[in-house]
Image (cartoon, rainbow, N blue to C red):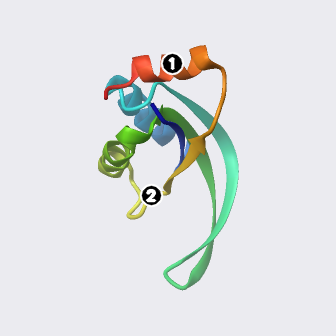
Amino acid sequence: MSYTFAYITASGQAEAQRIGQVLVEKKLAACVNIFTGMQSMYMWQGKIEKSSEAVIIAKTTENLQDRLVEQVKKTHSYECPCVVFLPVTDGNPEFLQWIGDETVS
């Protein structure tokens, strides 16, 4: 099984918690970590934007990536939410097995 971490940004802690809860409840992620107070600067529709956001790191499997993206898009307030995946190449075998056990295949 291949494991991956999803990096997702949200408008704030409340939205991040809502998204994270849905991902865990639907077994699309075994666990989420939420980091608040991130400052973002980005180009959007030809203009530089600055905002405070929250970051979600969701632990999941590679085969759930498409379903996870679709669920985030349904739940998220952004027109174009950031959802990117970082491959997990190695780690504690018991922890990786736990991710697999707690997600749907």
Q: Examine the rendering and report whether any part of residue 13 can be seen.
A: no
The local secondary structure at tag 2 comes to loop
Q: In which quarter of the image is residue 94?
A: top right
Going 41% across and 63% down the picture, which residue do you hit? 80
Relative placement, left or right, of 99 versus 33 is left
The local secondary structure at tag 1 comes to helix
Q: 67 or 46, which is in the foreground?
A: 67
Relative placement, left or right, of 96 versus 38 is left
Vertical arrangement, residue 46 with respect to residue 100, above or below: below
In percent of width and height, residue 86 lies at: 58, 47
Q: 63 or 9, which is in the foreground?
A: 63
- The residue most toward the bottom is 46
Vertical arrangement, residue 42 with respect to residue 70, above or below: below
Quarter occupied by the N terminus: top left
Vertical arrangement, residue 86 with respect to residue 31, above or below: below
- Judge depth for marks 1 and 2 and give the one in front: 1
Q: Which of marks 1 and 2 is nearer the N terminus?
A: 2
Q: Examine the rendering and report whether any part of residue 24 can be seen.
A: yes
Going 57% across and 38% down the picture, which residue do you hit? 57
The residue under label 1 is 97
Q: Which mark is residue 81?
A: 2
| Amino acid at circle 2 | Pro
| Amino acid at circle 1 | Gln
Relative placement, left or right, of 75 versus 14 is left
In percent of width and height, residue 62 lies at: 43, 41
| Dot 2 alpha-carbon crowd within 10 angstroms: few under 14, some 14 to 19, many 20 or more | some
Q: Answer yes or no: do the residues labelled 1 and 2 have beta carbons within 8 Å?
A: no
In percent of width and height, residue 76 lies at: 38, 49
